[in-house]
Image: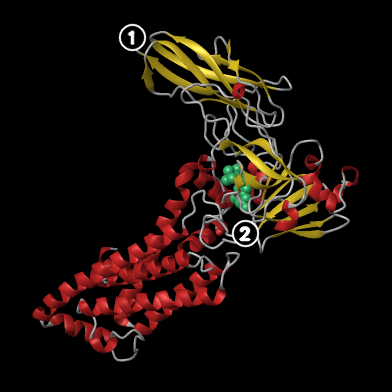
Amino acid sequence: MESRLKFLKFRAFVSGAVGIIVAFGITELVHGLYQLVPSVLVSLAQRVVELTPGQLVTQGIEMLGKADIPVLITVMLIFTVAIAGLLANLALRSWVAALAGVAVLAAVAVAAAFSKPFIAPVATVATIVGALAAGVVVTALLLRAAGLMSPAVSGASGSPGGSPSTEVRSREAHSSGGMAVGRRSFLVLGGGATVAGALAAGFGRMLAGGGTETAAQSSESGGESVAPSQVKTLPPPPPGASLEVEGMPPLITPAKDFYLIDSALSSPRIERENWSLEVKGAVDNPFEITYKDLVSMPAREADITLSCVSNKVGGGLISNGRWTGVLLSDVLKEAGMSPDKINRKSEQLVGRSVDGWTSGFKTARAFDGREALVVFGLNGEELPVKHGYPVRLVVPGLYGYISATKWLTEIELTDWDFDAYWIQRGWSKQGPIKTQSRIDTVFGDRSIPPGRTPVGGVAWAPHRGIKRVEVSTDDGESWNEARLAEQLDVDTWRQYVYEWDAEPGEHTLKVRATDGEGETQTDERSAAHPSGATGYHTVKVTVNEG
Ligand SMILES: Nc1nc2c(c(=O)[nH]1)N[C@H]1C(S)=C(S)[C@@H](COP(=O)(O)O)O[C@H]1N2
Ligand SMILES: [Mo]
């Protein structure tokens, strides 16, 4: 191993690494300025996710949580930098071989970029080729400054031929004075190029942004406003639905804090002018609807709590939104569908995203009275890009992975045999949100002063509602009735609080909820996979002597 590594010249490695950083800087900057050229880094990482077996992806998401994307991108970056360093070493022996390697990189990058929806093909190819060419030039200049390559062979075109390896050896052997000058320019050029590349990439990422911005706030979409015509809005939530307790999450989650889960490493950006929804499959009247048509249908606001199946007991992958949208049943009626027409061939409703992601649930859920919505607004604003702009599905009582397709572009009615994205990856095909409760106002592994301590939080059983919440302060030996806030809607979570008179010592707090049908959540612990975590949220606290 050691001896093999000696073949590698460190400065050549650095030259290649700097070259690829410059190349990435250029692609990211162009992406920031022009969204239709996708981020090469993100598209590469996206392909990796898609080609990785689902179980592994799932574990990755569970292990890394919100850090999964940055970690993956960092690994990609290190991997690519290493390849570039090796290619620069290869260049010392054969420019032809090294350039062939660069061509392979270009091909991989183009292939990854083209797997994204909505790209400008010519600009994308030009950007990738241009960026890699710039990287090659920088690498060649650095190799020359490092004295590893004669000016004659360091042109960007890589003028093959000659015998670079003997050339290199002879240059290294003599002229130590020349090397000193070379070292300085190597450092200046190398450092400068790295900083420039990193700055360009950083600036590009910043421009590309994301956050919870809406498309209207982001640069391109200044289009005419398409105002929904008839929205049945809701009154502000009654004051009784919120409890004034420190640490309690807000009844309606602000869009910027709404939890985020998707397989898309960067959100697809779709202009609503170009958006349409196709309703197809086992329906009498397959049809396509534009954004304008959709928002001119009767719309409503609905308070619905959305949860991710991979939320751990006590976890934060749950939020409550006030969604604006059209009833899914109304859209299906336009396609000639009605509850009595549901049969084996139309048993499942598949929602497909522009990026190919799918969810699927029983078509009957669209007609059983719950406010399953084709959504275009969140909390009185346009749907944020990250949460599915311009249109997504939200179905009360069902986990997001089977129902809540973001960047929705297709609804297909089909049989139950079709397996949607996460079903193919081993998650349960049935995805009702399990009854759960969480302690928000007291944290574990911390000590608190004795005396009155509100133990509160949220409990949820979307579409069944919460009838009762109990809190135990003695590890489940005895249970105390918690005070409930008003239930905003059966489809939302409900706040509770139990005023605990905390005495010094160690205490194990637990919470359990009973749904509107009288069913109490199970205390049996199970992991999130395959159908949602169960068990009581448990918090250990130490109460001081005071
Ligand atoms: N297109 C698309 N839609 C998607 C997903 C996805 O990966 N891609 N993830 C789903 C999952 S697993 C959940 S829990 C919800 C999360 O919605 P949010 O990110 O708006 O909170 O979206 C669902 N919709
Ligand atoms: Mo999810």
Query: Which residue is identified by label 2?
Result: 355
Q: Give the left or right position of residue 272, taking residue 169 as reference.
A: right
Seen in the picture, residue 63 relative to 335 is either above or below; the reply is: above
Type of amino acid under label 1: Glu
Q: Is residue 81 above or below residue 263?
A: below
Between disc 2 and disc 1, whose residue precedes? 2
Between residue 484 and residue 478, name the one nearer to us: 484
Q: Position of residue 366 (x, y in %)?
A: 78, 42
**Residue at x-position 79% and y-position 50%:** 331
Measure how far apart labels 2 and 1 are at the Cα level: 57 Å
Position of residue 163 relative to residue 509, above or below, is below
Q: Is mark 2 within 8 Å of ligand 1?
A: yes
Which residue is located at x 64 percent, y 46 percent? 377
Q: Position of residue 367 (x, y in %)?
A: 82, 40
In the image, residue 49 above or below residue 31: above
The residue lying toward the viewer, choosing from 263 and 250, is 250
Depth order, front residue of 512/406: 406
Amino acid beneath label 2:
Asp
Residue 317 visible in image: yes
Q: Position of residue 403 (x, y in %)?
A: 69, 44
Q: Circle 2 — which element?
A: loop
Task: Tell me: 240 left or right of 3.
Answer: right
For label 1, the residue is: 545
Q: Quadrant of the N terminus?
A: bottom left
Q: Position of residue 390 (x, y in %)?
A: 63, 54
